[in-house]
Amino acid sequence: MIEYLTDVFSNYTLRTVILGTSGLGIVSGALGVFAYLRKQSLVGGVVSHSALPGIVIAFLVTGSKAPSVLVLGAAIAGWLSMLLVNMITRTTRVKYDSALGITLALFFGTGILLLIRVQMAGMSKKAGLEHYLFGMAATMSHENVLVIGGLGGLALILMFVFWKEFKVASFDPDYTKSVGFSVHLIDTIITSLIVVAIVIGLEAVGVILMSAMVIIPAAAARQWTNRLSLMVLISAVIGAAAGVGGTLIGDSGHHLATGPLIVLTATALFILSLFFAPKRGMAIHWIRQWKRKRRMMHRQIPALLHDLMERTKTKDDGWTIDVIRGLSPYKSGIDRVLNHLKSEGLVQQANDLWFLTQKGVEYVGIDSKDHGG
Amino acid sequence: MGYELLIILVASLTALACAIPGIFLILRGIAMMSDALSHSVLLGIVLMLFIVGDLSSPYLLVGAGLTGIFLVFLIELLGKTKRLPSDAAMALVFPALFSIAVFLINKYLHNVHIDTHMVLSGEILYISPKDSLILFGYNLGPKPFYTMLIILLINISFIGVFFKELKISTFDKQLASTIGSHPMLMHYFLMAVVAITAVGSFKFVGSILVTGLMIAPAATAYLLTDNLFKMLIIASIVGVVSAVSGFYLADFINSSPTGSMAMMTGVSFLIAYIFAPKRGLIAKFIGQSHQKDALARKILLTHLLHGEDDQSSKKEVLSSIQWKERFVDKILNGLIEENLVKSESNHIVLTDRGKKLLNELRSLSPITM
Amino acid sequence: MPQSAIEITSLTVAYHEQPVLWDINLSIPKGVIHGIIGPNGAGKSTLIKAILGIVHPIAGQVKVFGEEYKKQRKRVAYVPQRTSVDWDFPSDVLDIVLMGSYGQVGWIRRPGKKEKKMAIEALEKLGLANLAHRQISELSGGQQQRTFLARSLVQKPDIYLMDEPFAGIDAKTEKTIISLMKELKNQGKTLIVVHHDLQTVREYFDWLTLLNTSIIAHGPTQEVFSDNTIEQAYGGQIQKHPSLV
C-alpha cells in the first residue's frame, strides 16, 4: 500500500493527472450544487454534449489541440446551446425539456458529424479528439492542469463573490427581483459558471458523461447536510474523490476510458450517502420506521389481548398467534414482539396459546390512561 | 436490395417508429426520458452479450428492453425516497447505467466487435444486405429492415388501439382518471413503447439519433399544428426527411450518417422555429405587433372613457398610459381611420361609433369606477 | 387629499396578448389594511407582481408614494405565496429571514452584525426565536408563513404586499399574523393583502378591492363588500376580453 502511494506520488504524469481530476471534481461538485437546487439537473447533459462541435471547430480553425484553445471552443458552444434552449422556451410553446432534447441532438449531431469528418481525413490521430467522447485522463498535460486551476479557480472565486445573490435567487427568484436584484443577470452568471465547470472536465471525463459530475456529487452532498455552505463543500470533496478514484482505477488497467470510472466512483459515493447519511439516510429512516412499528406493536398487542379477554370474560383463555395476527394491523414480526413481551412478564405462553398476565393487564390500564384511552 | 437504398429504408423506418411515441413524450413534458432510455439500453445489450456471446442475437434486444424497464423503475424508486428532486433522479441514473456499460466494454469486450463509437453513431454503415432473414428456406431480405418494420408496426398498433386513451391522459389527467381510463397505466405503456423503439433503433442509429428522432420532429410538428393526428403525420414526414437528407449530407462530405441525421432533425426544427406560419419567429413577430396594436387600440379606447365628456388631451393620455409618443400616434391614427375617435382642437373625442363600441365593451367587462 | 401609498393608473397586463389585468385604476390610501379578493385566475397575484415590477405591464403605471417603484423600493416589502418556493432548500430559518436585509445591503456585500440583530428581533417578534436554526424543510405551514413575514419585517418597509398569507395555516398562526398586521397598521404602515376567505373579509380589512381582471369594486370595506359586488366578481366566469377592432 505504502509502496503504491509512493509510486503514485513519484510518478510525475500520474501526479499531474490526479491534480487535474481532483481539481475538476472540486469545481463541478461545488457549482453543480446550484444546478441541482435550481432543478436544472438535465442542463449539464446538454451543455457537455453541445461542447463537442465547439471542440472540433476550435481544432479545425486553429489547427491546435492546446487545452486552452479547445476549452474555449467548448465553452462557446456550450454557452450557445443554453442560449438556444432559453430562446426556444421563451418564444414558443415547446416545453423546456423538449428544448433541451432538440438542442442536444442539433449540437451533438453536428459535433459527431465534424469529428468523424476529421477522423476520415486522417487528422484525428494527431488531435486525439476522440478522447473527448469518453475521457482519457492519462493524456492530461501540465497545461490542462493550469487551465483547470485557472478557469476553475476563477469560477469558484466568482461563486464566493456572488454567494448571497446565488443563494437568494435559487431559493426565491420573485422575491429577489422585488428587492432590486437582476435575476436575469444572476441566472446568466450561474449558467456561465456551470458551463465553465463542465468544459474544464471534458478531456478527463468526456462530453457524454461530464454532465453526471455536476449532479451526482451534489445529490450525494444534499444527504449529509442542510446547510448550503456545507453542501457546496461536501459536494466539492465528493467530486474530488470521484475524480481521483476514477483516475487511479483507470491507471491500473489498459484501454480504460476514465469518464465511466469517475462517474461510477461518484455513483458509489452517492449510494453510500443515500443509505448511510445521518438524519436523511435511508438506513436511519428504515431503522426509525422499524422502531416506531415495534413500539406501536408493543402497545397494541397487549391491548388487543386485553380486549379479547374483556369480551370473552374469562381469564384463562389464551389465543393462538394466528388469531392475534388476524386481529392486528401488523402482520409481520408478531412472534418476536410476543417473545419480548414475555421476557418483560406482560404475557405468558402455554402450548400454542398466549395470555395476558396480571402485570400485562395493569400495563394496558396505565397505557390507555397515558394516551387518553 | 442496394446498400444505399437499404440504409435509407432502415433509417426512414426508424424515423417513423420514433416519431410516434415522440409526440406523446413532448406533449407530456417527459422528452428527456428518450435520452435516458437510449443511453441505458446499452447496459442490457452488453450484459446479454456476456450471456449469449453473439452480437446479432435477438436476445440483445430483450436484454436492452429489460434495462429500459429497470431504468424507469430505478428513477421512480429514487423519486419515492423523497431525498432528491425527480429531474436529479433521472440525470443521475442513466449516466450511471451507461458508465457501467462502457466500462464493461472497455474492460472485457475489447476484442469483440463492439466499440464505444457504436454507442454514439450506431452501426447503420455496417448493415449488410447479406445479413438476411431466412424463413422456411426463403430469403426474405435483410434483417434490420424487418426489425424496424416490426417495431414500427408495434408502435402504429399501439397508437391505433389507445389513441383516445393516450389523448385524454396526455391532455387532461384528472378527466382521464374520472372516466376510468388509467393514466398511470398509459404512462407505463408509453414508456414500454419508447423503450422498445429505443432498443430497436439503438443498434442501427445510436443513442443520440434516437433522442433526436423522438423529440425534434415531434416538436417541429407541435409548432405547425394543433391537431394531434396531423401532428403525427407531420412528425413522421419531418423525421423521414431529416434522416434522408442527413444521409446524403454525410455521404457528400464523407462523414458519420447518424451524426448528420441527428443534426438534420435539429435543423428541421430550427427551420420551423423561424418560418412556421403561425408560431414561427417571423410570423410571431408580425402577428404579435398586429395583436399588440389591436390590444393597444382597445386600451386607448377604454382609457378615453375616464376623460371628461368622453374626451382627453393627448398629453393626459401620454402621462397615464406610459407609452412612447410615436406609438400613441400610431394607435390614434388607427382609431381615427376606423372612425372611432376624432381629433378636435388638441382633444381626442369619441365618435358615436366609438361610443357604441365602448358601451358594448363596458357591458362585457364591468367597470364601475 | 392626502398622498396615497400606491396609485395605479390605466394598468393593463397581458400574457400572450390575453389580458390578465384590464385597465386598473386604483388608489390605495396610507395606513390601512387593504384586501384584494376575487376568484382564482382573477389576476390578484399579478396585480401585486405588477406593483413590484416583477411583471411588466403593456400600459399604465404604478406610483409608490408618488414615485416610480424603483425609487421607493426600500420602502416596500413583498411576502410571496408560501407555496411558491421549494422548502427543501438547504437553509435554516435565520438564513431566510436574513435575506430581508439583502436589498439594503446591495450587490456582493454580506449582511453584518447589525443585520443579524435585526433578523433576530424579527424572529422574536413572530415567536420564532427558538426555531432560528431549524431547517426550513422541517417547518409547518404556519411556521413557514411566519418565516416569510419575519423576513419582510427585516426590510422595515412602509408598505407590505402579501400574497395569500392566510392560506393553509393553523388558526393560531392566523391570529398571530392578523394581530401583527393591526400593530403595523397602528404604526402607520400600509398592508396590501391578497386574500381568499370571504368569511373574514369584514373583520380583517379596512379597504377592499374586488378584482376579476378589471376592478369590480374598490373602497372602504363596509361600502363595497356586498352580495351584489361579490356576485359580480365571483358569479360569472372570469372575464375574457373579446379581441376588438
Image (cartoon, grey):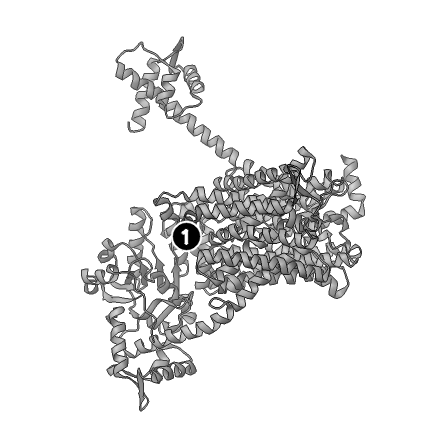
Instruction: Decide which of A163, C45 is in the foreground and name it.
Output: C45
In the picture, residue B48 is in which quadrant? top right
The C terminus of chain A, quarter of image:
top left
Instruction: Decide which of C64, A218 is in the foreground and name it.
Output: A218
The N terminus of chain A, quarter of image:
top right
- x then y, percent, for residue B2: 69, 53
Residue A31 in sight? no
Q: Decide if residue A20 is on the left or right side of residue C231.
A: right
Q: Could you tell me which chain the residue with mark 1 belongs to?
A: B
Pointer 1 residue = B171
- x then y, percent, for residue A261: 68, 43
In the picture, residue B349 is in which quadrant? bottom left
Amino acid type of the residue that numbered disc 1 sits on in the rendered structure: Phe
- x then y, percent, for residue B250: 69, 59
Could you classify mark 1 by the number of other residues whose Cα lies within 10 Å: few (under 14), some (14-19), or many (20 or more)? few
For the point 42% across and 75% down, the residue is B290
- Compared with residue C189, is residue A330 higher up or lower down, i.e. above or below? above
Instruction: Decide which of A233, C23 is in the foreground and name it.
Output: C23
- x then y, percent, for residue A145: 73, 54
